[in-house]
Amino acid sequence: MQIPFNKPYLTGKETEYIREAVASGKISGDGLFTKKCHQFFEQRYGFKKCLLTTSCTDALEMCAILLDIRAGDEVIAPSYTFVSTVNAFVLRGAKIIFADSEANTPNIDADTIESLISPKTKAIIAVHYAGIACDMDKIMAIAHKHNLFVVEDAAQAIDSYYNPFGLNPPSLRGGARGGAGVPLGSIGHLATFSFHETKNIISGEGGMLVINDKHFMQRAEIIREKGTNRAAFFRGEIDKYGWVDIGSSFLPSDIIAAFLYAQLENLDDIQNRRKEIWQMYNDALQKLEREGKIQLAKIPHYATNNAAIFYLLCANKSERTKLIKFLSLKGILAVFHYLPLHKSSYYQDKHSGGELPNSNAYADRLLRVPFFYELSAENQNLVIESIFEFYGC
Ligand SMILES: *Cc1c(COP(=O)(O)O)cnc(C)c1O
């Protein structure tokens, strides 16, 4: 028997909505389902403006263009993240100044940001790892003081919240609207989400740009439509459209949006089930943490948990390698991720800062176990028992 690491969950209506989109005769971008998705996000989370994109990577590339990133500009970002977080800015000529993670979470350590700021700094990228909020009040205050932009890479952070007043324990409360704080993705000037098949809400490939600073709204539409003012034209705001800026084709087909909309209609159900699975892992593995064998995720008082990822921390890299092998012999696929970007083959020569010990430690010690909507209780128990067996308990 094999227990995969991830299995994309289909809610049932995806193909029906795709058929509807096809039947409508308009399957390029910004069709009926794209509008429905935009409305859903804007209503549910109060995002000022949402634009579906073909991926979170594309949404990040739009951010780099919107912020007018040019050769020589500096962008501060965590080293422990997915490559797209920073590659989008490198494409525009930026130098990435890598920050370390916090000791307690893989998120950027806000206390180290100010020491990385120079006259060339333009933006800070806050990645909400595993959907757990970064220390946003601190980050926004630094950005305000130094006149910098903040982009939230909220790829993993759908339906998760930040609450500076710490309504703890909100971590696993369903829905979490009102009371749990402000939605992640609504705090920075810009924010990006991913609907890649490994995330909570999926469309195969897919993403979204959220624009919170209204100065960027008009230009975002233009950049997404190949540098043309086509969107305004279709709204009847102008009588002809043309090339007015740089851009690319960042908008997804309505077929993708149709798939996504079926997922959104089931967002609460998906989130509830994922939180159940997360909680079951966390409860069961507490014993190993108490015995000092592993460490589990720490959720800061200001963050909710959207059950995007379940991870544990092994003592060190060699122990993690052994555990992965042990689980794989039992047919269980567990994976690690993020080689620190400051040590990547592409960037190690360009990295000008010092060692980033916490980033290195998460890269060496973090292990993700099978986690998906349809993971059965039986299989989840097998994963848990196997981890206990590995640690000799
Ligand atoms: C998944 C992910 C991305 C990339 O998302 P795509 O939609 O695959 O482009 C970017 N940043 C983070 C933190 C991610 O987890």
Image: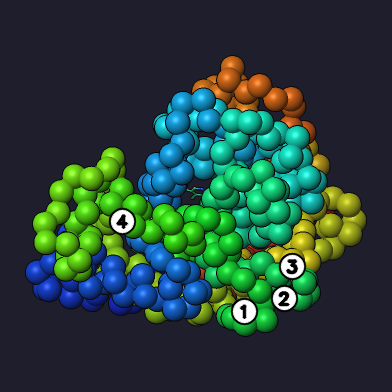
State the SS at label 3.
loop
Which residue is located at x 89 percent, y 52 percent?
A: 292
Position of residue 10 in the picture relative to residue 6 (left or right):
left
Nearer the observer, 78 or 68? 68
* Residue at the disc numbered 3: 164
- The Cα–Cα distance between marks 2 and 1, rounded to whole angstroms, is 8 Å
* Residue at the disc numbered 1: 176
Nearer the observer, 308 or 93? 93
* Residue at the disc numbered 2: 170
- The Cα–Cα distance between marks 1 and 3, rounded to whole angstroms, is 15 Å
Within 8 Å of ligand 1, the CB of disc 2? no
Estimate the x, y position of residue 307 in percent, counting from the top left: 61, 66
* Residue at the disc numbered 4: 221
Disc 1 + disc 3, Cβ < 8 Å: no
- Residue type of the residue flagged with mark 4: Glu
Disc 2 + disc 1, Cβ < 8 Å: yes
Which residue is located at x 34 percent, y 52 percent?
A: 219
Ranked by sequence position, the earlier of labels 4 and 1 is 1
Estimate the x, y position of residue 135 in percent, counting from the top left: 72, 56
Image quadrant where residue 325 sits: top right
- The Cα–Cα distance between marks 2 and 4, rounded to whole angstroms, is 36 Å
For the residues carrying marks 2 and 3, which lies nearer the camera in this image?
A: 3
In the rendered image, the vertical position of residue 83 relative to residue 263, given as above or below: above
For the residues carrying marks 2 and 4, which lies nearer the camera in this image?
A: 4
Disc 2 + disc 4, Cβ < 8 Å: no
- Residue type of the residue flagged with mark 3: Pro
Nearer the observer, 70 or 11? 70
